[in-house]
Amino acid sequence: MKTCCPHCHGVFDDGHAGDAYLRDEQALATIILWSSGQFDTTDIANALQCREDAVYRTLQMAKDGARADRRRA
């Protein structure tokens, strides 16, 4: 069975995540909530009504981007 999260990129087959990332306001909210140090990925996923793996992937992508920016400076 294929399902799709309206807030994420990707399609999920049988409960397994595809390449799901949050986008736009949800991605920004994820980064802000995580940076506050008061929320874990489960809390953020519940608050934004999305999958926890999408929250994790979005945070990882943001961290990787920050590392790349530091290397260029």
Image (tube, rainbow, N blue to C red):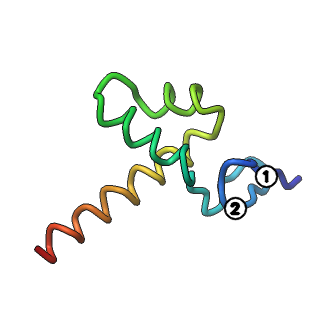
Residue 25 left/right relative to 28: right
Quadrant containing the C terminus is bottom left
Quadrant assignment, res 52: top right
Is mark 1 in CB contact (under 8 Å) with mark 2? yes
Q: Residues within 10 Å of mark 1 (few under 14, many from 20)?
A: some
- Residue depicted at 22% across the width and 64% down the height: 67
- Residue depicted at 47% across the width and 39% down the height: 29
Name the amino acid type tagged 2.
Gly
The span from disc 1 to disc 2 (Cα, nearest Å) is 7 Å
Question: Which residue is the site of mark 1?
Answer: 4
Q: Front-most of 47 and 57?
A: 47
User: Could you say where residue 69 lies in the image, as x and y percent from the top left?
Assistant: 22, 69
User: Could you say where residue 13 lies in the image, as x and y percent from the top left?
Assistant: 78, 57
Residue 47 left/right relative to 63: right
Q: Front-most of 27 and 46?
A: 27
Q: Above or below — where is 71 with respect to 54?
A: below
Instruction: Looking at the image, tell me whether mark 1 or mark 2 is earlier in sequence order.
Output: 1
- Residue depicted at 51% across the width and 29% down the height: 42
Secondary structure beneath label 2: loop
